Image (spheres, rainbow, N blue to C red):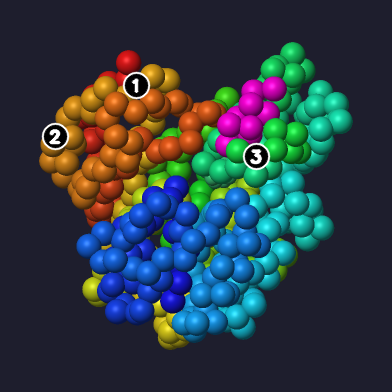
Amino acid sequence: MLIVLPSSSYRVADFVAAAKMLRAETVIATNAAQAMAGDMAYPMVRIDPRDPEWSAGRIVEFAQRFPLDAVVAADEEGVVMAAVAARELGLPHNPPEAVRVTRDKAAMRQVFADAALPQPLFRVIGADDDPVAACSEVGFPCVVKPVSLSASRGVVRVDGIAEVADTVARIRTITAEAGRDPGEPILAESFVSGTEVALEGLLVDGHLEVLALFDKPDPMNGPYFEETILVTPSRLAHHVRDEIAAISRAAADALGLVQGPIHAEARVDDSRVWLLEVAARSIGGLCGRTLRFGLLGTSLETMLLRSALGYRGVLAKRQSPASGVMMLPIARAGTLFAVGGQEQAKAVPGIVDVELTIPIGSRVRPPPEANRYLGFLFASGNTTRAVEKALRQAHAELTIDIR
Ligand SMILES: Nc1ncnc2c1ncn2[C@@H]1O[C@H](COP(=O)(O)OP(=O)(O)OP(=O)(O)O)[C@@H](O)[C@H]1O
Ligand SMILES: [Mg+2]
């Protein structure tokens, strides 16, 4: 099998470990300068995440010499090339067009609107459009965001007309810094209040299996939307959880996604579910480590690779009664000088691991400019509540020194 693992991926170690676990002959498609596969040197195929079509061509070329049984994208940047290559090779795949739509928040909103799915009001602000008119039409407060970025990059709540111009300019700068066309459309949406959830699912031949539903217990009211805690199982009422699953299923259908992982985000306001978005990938960063399946504690990545290789059969049940992760907030811009208290944080009952993902000495920025996660705290426990408490307690032990 071939795994697309761009140099920006947080998932290299986890996918490589999963490949090893499965003892499958593996090749890594990457733009990284050197083999990144830890102690095992995997053959590599050179790709360019900015050019999915060309990259798909490289993958197909490789497969003509060494036939592939599966092409798997580890994260967002690889999903289009993986879909194009798998289609060329006659392997199970998502339609490339469906995947492309998930990479464009404006196109995705249109697909959801056509399918009459519950979602915020939206307007697309093209390079020549008047952003004030667009925001006024969806109403204030609204949320303004680039159509092509992720990890809440460039996502900003706007409370009134006076803030629109500056926010749009700021978003265009962020878009340019991310290497995208600064003139690309911007999306304005009505602000959906309520609590947020994330659904982790796996599509097998068009059938969606829910792997986990996460609550995001920290209020995310903006103006910037930094992700912090995710805990599962969700504490929402059964009928609301069922509704979230039904809407995610309908959204995947509307998009035309049929294979592989999906990560859906929604908000719940007074038991009403509003769809934020669906990505054709699994959960981002290192958050997948909160999920272990079956008796053996099989990793999420192993499940995904097995599924891509065509292993069928009942999906294993998620292990451990409750688990969760905290993405460490970046309080301000500066240089990361030190992170103290890591041992104390690890010693908090329920904490499984503490992992920093930005080296000491690096420049860091909070959202909406941030483009990397500072680090992750992982916890498991008997109840969602206990897991949340452990994460908060461990976070309180950390002294994150940014100067
Ligand atoms: N219309 C909205 N109403 C309320 N909150 C919103 C809205 N749109 C986005 N948000 C908040 O901003 C966050 C990021 O927005 P969105 O998911 O659209 O962007 P993203 O960059 O894809 O984020 P990620 O990669 O973290 O999923 C959401 O998780 C949500 O908390
Ligand atoms: Mg999102």
Q: Does residue 11 sit above or below 68 in this rendering? A: above
Q: Which residue occupies the foreground of this view, 334 or 294? A: 334
Mark before the other along the chain sequence, 1 or 3: 3
CA gap between label 2 and label 3 equals 41 Å
CA gap between label 1 and label 3 equals 25 Å
Range drawn in magenta: 169-178
- The answer to whether one can see residue 116 in this image is no
Q: Does residue 339 sit above or below 149 in this rendering? A: above
Of the numbered discs in the image, which one, if any, rests on residue 180?
A: 3
Q: Judge the density around disc 2: few (<14), some (14-19), many (≥20) Cα neighbours within 10 Å.
A: some
Looking at the rendered structure, the kind of residue marked 2 is: Gln
Residue at image mark 1: 335
Q: Position of residue 124 (x, y in %)?
A: 80, 39
Q: Main secondary structure of the magenta part?
A: helix
Q: Quadrant of the C terminus?
A: top left
Q: Does residue 72 sit above or below 386 in this rendering? A: below
Q: For mark 1, give the secondary structure.
A: strand
Label 3 near label 1: C-beta < 8 Å? no
Q: Quadrant of the N terminus?
A: bottom left
Q: Judge the density around disc 3: few (<14), some (14-19), many (≥20) Cα neighbours within 10 Å.
A: some
Where, by quadrant of the figure, is residue 173 drawn? top right
Residue at image mark 2: 344
Q: Nearer the viewer, mark 1 or mark 2?
A: 1
Looking at the rendered structure, the kind of residue marked 1 is: Thr
Label 3 near label 2: C-beta < 8 Å? no
Q: Does residue 306 sit above or below 280 in this rendering? A: below
Looking at the rendered structure, the kind of residue marked 3 is: Arg
Q: Which residue occupies the foreground of this view, 230 or 62? A: 62
Mark before the other along the chain sequence, 1 or 2: 1
Q: Position of residue 353 (x, y in %)?
A: 22, 47
Q: Position of residue 46 (x, y in %)?
A: 49, 61
